[in-house]
């Protein structure tokens, strides 16, 4: 298959590109510069220069493809305590998905879009499941992604969604990475209350395989959860981070967390486990990579 991949130069996308090439697919990866594109050429992919803010570049990338995987996202606002910027980036994601949908409409060519498991934590304290209704973008801006998916699916696009939890290797661990940065800065590895709230996780190599399987045998309209661990407690995470950084792990109240973590503080105390039972069955996917705590044990 000739596959157009956005976010091909990113943490997860680069793994996806390598898996696709290894499986014999021809990959056209979106890159913002020739320098960035060089890494794609080195693993046997082709480069398509463009940007999320340039819809024509997305159209020309997708038009000759047999399938599209969308992973690009501007994270500047998400990790810079700038919620208005994060909201704008989520709304850009909505427009990007609509643009890709426009190109693929009227064909059977699959589009695989990236979302997060958090949007499906709609039954309090129960693991999010693939079939849950999702929250509104009015409550959490990132839900704009799946609103766009629903809209283009209604227009006949063969679109599926991969929902991600914290995606990790020994260097990057999703939203745990900014928590580590704050722990380094403040000399305390904090968790909220008794820290028994859980976040789901997956190793980056396992997440990449879900994208490849969703592209090759995904069902139109399906939501897949690339989740290996249903939930790891925030206390366990804070303790391993504290141990590795040689700083104390400490419980804080929700009010203290808001001041300590900035806007990530509103997420640190949330209990958002997620299941992948349906995904494992539908895609015949079994995660095999190391767990989140094992990767955090390698932190320096
Ligand atoms: N990592 C996680 O734990 C996690 C969890 C839930 C959801 N997700 C989602 O999964 C997707 C991939 O995440 P990731 O961890 O691989 O992120 P990442 O390492 O930050 O990669 C982001 C990708 O998007 C590209 N990009 C950024 N701004 C762009 C723009 N204006 N135009 C074109 N491309 C642009 C980046 O290109 P450059 O290389 O040029 O910067 C890079 O290829 C994102 O949608 C993310 O929100 C990730």
Image (tube, rainbow, N blue to C red):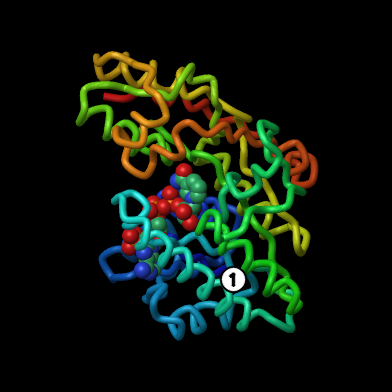
Give the residue at the far front of this rendering: 255
Disc 1 crowd rating (10 Å Cα; few below 14, some 14-19, many 20+) is some
Q: Which residue is drawn at the image coordinates 73% and 79% (left, top)? A: 155
Who is closer to the viewer here, 290 or 1? 290
Q: Quadrant of the N terminus?
A: bottom right
Percent of width and height locating residue 99:
55, 79
Q: Is residue 18 visible?
A: no
Judged left or right of residue 111, residue 265 is left
- Residue drawn at (65%, 36%), measured in percent from left and top? 274
Q: Which residue is mark 1?
A: 2
Left of 94 or right of it: where is 242?
left
* Location of residue 25 in the rendering, given as x and y in whole percent from the top left corner: 59, 62
Looking at the image, residue 290 lies above or below residue 57: above
| Relative horizontal placement of residue 240, taking residue 287 as reference (left or right) | left
Residue 241 visible in the picture: yes
Ligand 1: give its quadrant: bottom left
156 or 219: which is nearer to us?
A: 156
Q: Position of residue 298 (x, y in %)?
A: 35, 23
Q: Quadrant of the C terminus?
A: top left
Considering the numbered disc 1 on the image, is that residue within a helix, a strand or a loop?
strand
Relative height, residue 128 to residue 12 (above, below): above
Q: Residue at x 75, y 36 (%)?
A: 277
């Amino acid at each position: 298959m000739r596959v157009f991949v956005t976010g091909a130069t990113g943490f997860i996308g680069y793994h996806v590109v390598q898996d696709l090439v290894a499986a014999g697919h021809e990959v056209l990866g979106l890159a913002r510069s020739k320098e960035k594109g060089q890494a794609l050429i080195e693993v046997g992919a082709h480069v398509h220069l463009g940007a999320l803010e340039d819809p024509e570049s997305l159209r020309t990338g997708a038009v000759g493809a047999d399938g599209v995987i969308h992973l690009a996202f501007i994270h500047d606002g998400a990790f810079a305590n700038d919620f208005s910027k994060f909201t704008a980036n989520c709304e850009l994601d909505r427009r990007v998905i609509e643009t890709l949908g426009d190109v693929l409409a009227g064909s059977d060519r699959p589009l695989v879009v990236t979302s997060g498991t958090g949007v499906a934590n709609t039954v309090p304290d129960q693991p999010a499941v693939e079939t849950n209704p999702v929250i509104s973008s009015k409550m959490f801006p990132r839900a704009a992604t799946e609103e766009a998916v629903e809209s283009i699916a209604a227009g006949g696009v063969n679109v599926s969604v991969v929902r991600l939890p914290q995606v990790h290797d020994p260097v990057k661990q999703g939203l745990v990475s900014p928590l580590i940065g704050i722990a380094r800065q403040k000399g305390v590895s904090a968790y909220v209350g008794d820290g028994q709230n859980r976040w789901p996780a997956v190793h980056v190599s396992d997440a990449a395989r879900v994208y490849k399987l969703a592209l090759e045998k995904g069902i139109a309209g399906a939501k897949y959860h690339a989740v290996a661990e249903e939930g790891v407690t925030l206390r366990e995470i804070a303790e391993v981070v504290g141990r590795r950084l040689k700083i104390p792990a400490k419980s804080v109240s929700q009010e203290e967390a808001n001041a300590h973590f900035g806007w990530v503080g509103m997420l640190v105390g949330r209990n958002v486990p997620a299941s992948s039972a349906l995904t494992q069955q539908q895609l015949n996917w079994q995660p095999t990579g190391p767990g989140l705590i094992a990767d955090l044990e390698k932190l320096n």
